Amino acid sequence: MSAARLPGAPGGGRVTARAASAEWVPGQRLVADLRGEPGADVEVAPDPDAPSIGVLALQGDVLEHLRALRRSGARTVRVRSLEDLAAVDALVLPGGESTTIGKLLDRFGLLRPVRARIDDGLPVFGTCAGMILLSDELDQAEPQPLVGGIAVRTRRNAFGRQVDSFDTRLPVVGIDGGPVDVSFIRAPRVEAVLDADAVEVLAEVEGYPVVVRQGRLLATAFHPEVTGDGRLHALFVGMVRDSGG
Ligand code: GLN
């Protein structure tokens, strides 16, 4: 996978947990940088036609996604049941522990219905564990429940353990205004794109895809919701609006 066609220098300016401090908090440096900027913390009142975007709320990083989506003008709802799922125009699969979220999806009877809605065109944004869940294949021997939908093979914990987590500014294809502030927390990465015609690689770190899109499915290896930089959520809300949701 060549990084040559991507803007900027992927992965530049890493701040690792170890290097920064023992008390590193994901996104803290970047949030601090944004604080005080006009609009950094403003929620947009959703118009009545705003799409209703669900955040899967079985386990993981739910609240920050709800806020980031509302700041981009979406209406939001927590999804825990089939009824919740049926009512949304789009879905976010948050970060957390992909094994746990996958098992809970199965136990709550949501795994097949989420897949069925994706087949019907549901836009889905997966972040970190959510990217793992949206992958068609994992680079590991042990099976775990996956939603699938993006033709990639993904490796969990590809950047190391919790102490190897880092914040960075990442150029993302299609996002204007400079690199995006993001946090990699025990993050996965895409090891192989299985269908190069279907999958767009929007960003890479060290030559590996970390933002991919296939049709209405968007996935990031990192957490875009903890830094206060809402541009990836805005991109997704735009995808949802374009899909008619
Ligand atoms: N390492 C986790 C997993 O394998 C993902 C971490 C995250 O979502 N921050 O599921």
Image (cartoon, rainbow, N blue to C red):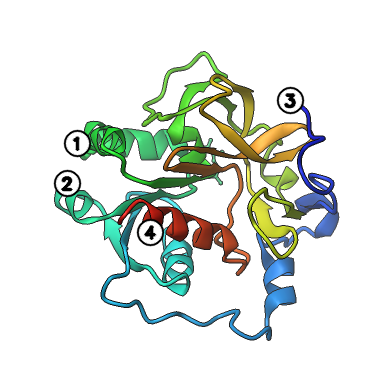
Give the quarter of the image for residue 162: top right
Q: Nearer the viewer, mark 1 or mark 2?
A: 2
How far apart are the two marked residues, 2 and 4, measured between alpha carbons?
Answer: 23 Å
Q: Earlier in the sequence, mark 1 or mark 2?
A: 2
Which residue is labeled 1 in the image?
Answer: 109
Q: Which element type, helix, strand or loop, lies under badge 3? A: loop
Residue at figure coordinates x 49%, y 44% from the top left: 218
Q: Earlier in the sequence, mark 2 or mark 4?
A: 2
* Quadrant containing the C terminus in the rendered view: bottom left
Res 82 label: 2
| Along the viewing direction, whichever of 113 and 244 lies nearer the viewer | 244
Q: Which element type, helix, strand or loop, lies under badge 4? A: helix
Q: Nearer the viewer, mark 3 or mark 1?
A: 3
Q: Quadrant of ligand 1?
A: top right
In this picture, is 192 found above or below 100?
above
In this picture, is 76 found above or below 162?
below
Q: Which element type, helix, strand or loop, lies under badge 1? A: loop
Q: Earlier in the sequence, mark 3 or mark 1?
A: 3
Which residue is labeled 3 in the image?
Answer: 1
Going by the numbered disc 1, the residue's amino acid type is Gly
Which residue is labeled 4 in the image?
Answer: 241
Going by the numbered disc 3, the residue's amino acid type is Met
90 left or right, relative to 207: left
Going by the numbered disc 2, the residue's amino acid type is Leu
